[in-house]
Amino acid sequence: MIVTNRSSRLDKTSRKLRVIVMWSYVLLILHIGVTTGSVVHILMLRPKSSIALAWITLIMTFPVIGVGLYFLIGERRIGLSRSNSIQQVRSYQKKYSSLTKSSPETIIKWEKHPEAAQAMSKLGHSMAATYAVAGNAFELFPETRSVFIQILSDIDAAKRNIFMEFYIWNEGGDADKVVSALINAAGRGVRCHILVDAIGASKWWGSAQAKTLENAGINLLKALPVGLFRTLVGRTDLRLHRKIIIIDETIAWTGSMNMVDPDFFKQDSGVGKWVDAMVRLQGPIVIPLAETVMGDWIVEHSSPSQSFITSVDFAAAKKCGESTMQVIASGPGQTSDALLQMILALVYAAREEIVLTTPYLIPDDSLLVALRGAAARGVSVTLVVPEKVDSFLTRHASESYFEELLTAGIQIVRFHQGLLHTKSISVDNSLSMFGTANIDMRSLWVNYEVTLFVYDSAFTRQLRLLQQMYIENANSVELSEWIKRPFLKQIMQNALRLASPLL
C-alpha cells in the first residue's frame, strides 16, 4: 500500500514536471518568435542605424518590456484615419500656399539675400510644401512679461477670429488674464478656437478654467488624446508641441512660450523660472501659420463646421515689412525629415559663426557631424543650454555629447538664470531659425513642431543680440575640467546616450 501511494505521488509529480517542461518550451518558442519577429520588423523598416540598434538592444536585453515599448512608441504610427486627414489638409494647404506665392507683393528678389537662402527655400518647399514669402514685419519679444502685455492688447483688438494652439496651458498669473480677455472677446462676437495638447496640459483640461472657457462659447479641442483604441492604431506619445496664435489673420505669434506664467509654472522643479522668447508677425507669413493651426484643428476635429473654414480671410495678410521667412510645420505624417534637413542646410551655410540655443541637446548623428565639421572649417560654434533641466534622463544623455563637442572646438555655455527654453539658431548674422523645436530626437522625429526659417539680417541680428544676453548669463564648460568628472558619472551618461534615440 505504501509503495502504491508513493508510486502515485511520483506519477503526479512526473506529470506536473512534463506540463512545466511543455509550457516552458511553448513560452521559449513564443519568446523567440516574438523577439525575432520584432527584430526583423525593425530591420525591414530600415530606420536610422542608431535608432534600430537602440531598439534591438532593448528588445534583446529586456524582451517583454522591450517588445511592449516598441509596440507603443517604436514607430511613427499615426493611424489610417489621421493619415488620411493629414493628406487632405496638406492638399488644402498647398492650394493656399500657391496663392501666397503668386501674389506680386510677396515675390522675392533672391539676389538681395544670403547666398544659401534660395536653396534653403527650395528645400523647404520640396519637403514641407510651404513657400518662403517676403514682405513681413516682425517684433521679437525677449521675455514673457512683455509677451503677455502685447498678446492681451491683440486679443482686446480682435474683431473676427482668434486661433490658439499650445502644448501646455497652465493656470495662474498672466495666463489667467489671457483667459479673461478671451472670454471678453467671445462676448463681443469674436470666434475663438483653442487647441491644446491632451498630455502637455492634462492637469488644465480637468480644471474649472477650461470649463469656464467652454461655457463662454469658446471652442476647445484636445490634441492627440490618448486611450486604448489610439494605442492600438497609433503611437501614443506623439505630441502637439506647437505654439501659435492667429488674430484676424493679420497677426501671428510663435516661439517657445507655452501659455504659462513662469512665476506660477513648475516652481517646485528646482530649475528656476522658464525663460522664453516669442515673435509677433505681420504680413504674408501669417497665412502659412494660420494654415497650420487650421489644419491641426481639422485633423483633430473629424467634421469641422463649414463656418469654421469659411470664416478665415486668407486675403487679410498684406505686405507690411521687408523680412523674408518660411514656415516649416513638421511631424509624423506631415513630413519625413524636413526639419532636420533644413537645420543641416542652415549649419552647412555657415562661414563665420553659429550660435544655437536649446533646452534639450540630443543631436541626430548627422547634425552632430555637421556641427563638428563647421568647427573644423573655422566657423565659431557656440551652443547655449540651461545649467539645469527638468528631465534627469535628458540632462545626462545630453551631457554625454559634451566631451565630443568640446574636443571638436565647439564652445558650450550653460545658462544659469533659469531653464532656458528658447529654441533658436543664428548663422553669420544673416540666416536664422526660431520656433518650437528642440535639438533632440523627439522634436526632430516625434513631435508636431512649427519653425520659422528667416532669410535676412534684420531679424537674425536681433536674435543674435538675444542669444548674446543668454551667453553673458552663462558659464562656459571647459574641456580640461569636464574630462575630470567622476568615472561613474561618465558611465551613466554614456549608457543613457545609447537610449538617446528613444528619448
Image (tube, rainbow, N blue to C red):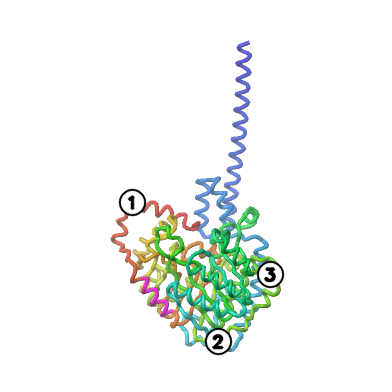
Marks 1/3: CA distance?
Answer: 57 Å
The residue carrying pointer 2 sits among few (fewer than 14), some (14 to 19) or many (20 or more) residues within 10 Å by Cα, namely many
* Residue at 36% in and 52% down: 489
The residue carrying pointer 1 sits among few (fewer than 14), some (14 to 19) or many (20 or more) residues within 10 Å by Cα, namely few
Residue 498, placed above or below residue 61: below
Where residue 262 appears, as percent x and y from the top left, is 44, 66
Write down the residue under mark 1. 487
Where residue 119 appears, as percent x and y from the top left, is 51, 79
- Residue 219 found in image quarter: bottom right
Could you tell me the amino acid type at mark 3? Pro
Where residue 444 appears, as percent x and y from the top left, is 51, 65
In the foreground, 84 or 337: 84
Residue 158 as seen in the image, left or right of residue 273:
right
Residue 294, placed above or below residue 484: below
Secondary structure mostly seen in the magenta stretch: helix
Q: Is residue 397 magenta?
A: no
- Residue 377 found in image quarter: bottom left
Write down the residue under mark 3. 304
Please, which residue is most extreme toward the bottom here? Answer: 104
Could you tell me the amino acid type at mark 2? Lys
Q: Nearer the viewer, mark 2 or mark 3?
A: 3
Residue 347 appears in the figure:
no
Where residue 247 appears, as percent x and y from the top left, is 57, 77
* Mark linked to residue 285: none
Marks 2/3: CA distance?
Answer: 30 Å
In the foreground, 308 or 352: 308
Write down the residue under mark 2. 319
Q: Which residues are magenta?
A: 460-470
Residue 298 appears in the figure:
yes
- Mark 2 or 3 closer to N-term? 3
Q: Secondary structure at mark 1?
A: helix
Q: Nearer the viewer, mark 1 or mark 3?
A: 3
